[in-house]
Image: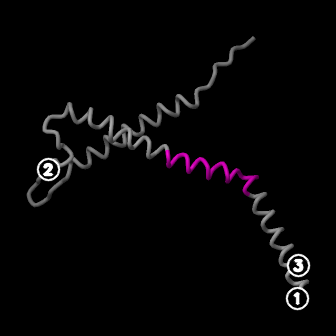
Amino acid sequence: MKKIVSGLGQANTKITGGFIAFLKEYGIIGLAIAVIIGAAVSKLVSALVADIIMPIVAFFIPGGNWREAVLMIGPVVLKIGSFVGAVLDFTIIAFVIYLIAKWLLKEEKVTKK
């Protein structure tokens, strides 16, 4: 019985070691960290857009509650305010992420000697 347990323990160590080597070789750990940081940055950018940028945009749009705007064509009701709001949110978020990425990934110019 002890030999079986010992054999299973060695097989388990080989599998675990192989799995850890796989994670290191293909950069899976770095990818997991990037996903977690990306989720945190997404929340940060969404808060920036919702709490700072959109109130400024809403100030310049008359009527204030423009996200509730609808277009009625007979019995069909199109919620254009909601759609335009989503497009505007996406555009602002994409632009802010572009600016952040450009700032973080700034490459130094290399001059020839």
Residues rendered magenta in the picture: 23-40
Residue identified by numbered label 2:
71
Q: Main secondary structure of the magenta part?
A: helix
Q: Quadrant of the C terminus?
A: top right
How much space separates mark 3 and mark 1, taking CA atoms? 9 Å
Q: Quadrant of the N terminus?
A: bottom right
Q: Nearer the viewer, residue 74 or 20?
A: 20
Residue at 75% over, 53% down: 24
Q: Nearer the viewer, residue 34 or 78?
A: 34
Check disc 3: other Cα within 10 Å, few if <14, some if 14-19, many if 20+.
Answer: few
Q: Is residue 109 above or below residue 81?
A: above
How much space separates mark 2 and mark 3, taking CA atoms? 72 Å
Check disc 2: other Cα within 10 Å, few if <14, some if 14-19, many if 20+.
Answer: few
**Which image quarter: residue 53?**
top left
Question: Is-magenta flag for residue 60?
Answer: no
Check disc 1: other Cα within 10 Å, few if <14, some if 14-19, many if 20+.
Answer: few
Question: Is-magenta flag for residue 27?
Answer: yes
Residue at 50% over, 49% down: 39
Residue identified by numbered label 1:
1
Q: Is residue 74 above or below residue 68?
A: below
Residue at 38% over, 42% down: 47
Q: Earlier in the sequence, mark 2 or mark 1?
A: 1
